[in-house]
Image: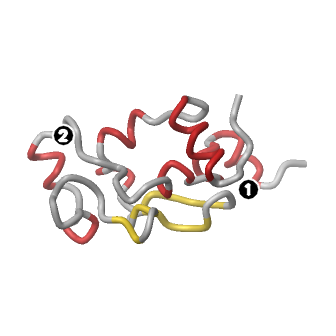
């Protein structure tokens, strides 16, 4: 029988990963967000240049949990467009997972 943790990771592998959210202090950057979308992101999570998310080291400050185990985005509904377009198993996902020593999704 599957545990709820196993079910979550199968249904949404991002919740058992978080590698893309802890890849670089220069990511995620704002790209095509309009003013309303940017205003919905709490100020404490925006970097000093207002160009992207504030990071603690290479980790997005909005990321909660332990990378590779269980993570979540504390501002999921208001996350930047670049976060919305990163998909499980895409090139960016694979690159981030490799950096963290996690298996690449297929």
Seen in the picture, residue 71 relative to 92 is either above or below; the reply is below
The residue wearing badge 1 is 5
Say which quarter of the image contains residue 62.
bottom left
Q: Earlier in the sequence, mark 1 or mark 2?
A: 1
| Residue appearing at x 25%, y 54% in the figure | 52
Residue 82 horizontal/vertical position (percent):
34, 39
Tell me if 5 is positioned left or right of 88 in this view.
Answer: right
Q: How many marks?
A: 2
Mark 2 burial class by Cα count in 10 Å: few <14, some 14-19, many 20+: few
Residue 49: which numbered mark, if any? none
Tell me if 3 is positioned left or right of 69 in this view.
Answer: right
Residue 33: which numbered mark, if any? 2
Residue 56 horizontal/vertical position (percent):
40, 71
Alpha carbon of mark 1 to alpha carbon of mark 2: how far?
33 Å
Seen in the picture, residue 68 relative to 104 is either above or below; the reply is below
Judged from this view, the residue extending furthest toward the right is 1
| Residue appearing at x 45%, y 62% in the figure | 58
| Residue appearing at x 65%, y 45% in the figure | 98
SS assignment at label 2:
loop
Seen from the viewer's position, the closer of residues 98 and 83 is 98
Quarter in which the C terminus is drawn? top right
**Nearer the observer, disc 1 or disc 2?**
2
Tell me if 56 is positioned left or right of 95 in this view.
Answer: left
Mark 1 burial class by Cα count in 10 Å: few <14, some 14-19, many 20+: few
| Residue appearing at x 69%, y 61% in the figure | 69
SS assignment at label 1:
helix
Residue 93 horizontal/vertical position (percent):
56, 38
Kindly indicate whether the residue at mark 2 contacts the one at mark 1 (C-beta within 8 angstroms).
no
Judged from this view, the residue extending furthest toward the left is 35
């Amino acid at each position: 029988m599957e545990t709820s943790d196993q079910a979550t990771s199968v249904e949404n592998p991002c919740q058992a990963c978080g590698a893309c959210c802890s890849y670089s202090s220069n990511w995620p950057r704002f790209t095509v967000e309009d003013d309303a979308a940017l205003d919905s992101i709490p100020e404490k999570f925006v970097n000093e240049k207002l160009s992207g998310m504030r990071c603690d080291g290479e980790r997005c400050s909005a990321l909660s949990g332990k990378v590779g185990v269980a993570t979540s985005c504390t501002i999921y509904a208001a996350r930047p467009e670049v976060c919305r377009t990163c998909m499980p198993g895409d090139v960016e996902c694979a690159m981030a997972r490799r950096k963290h020593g996690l298996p690449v999704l297929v």
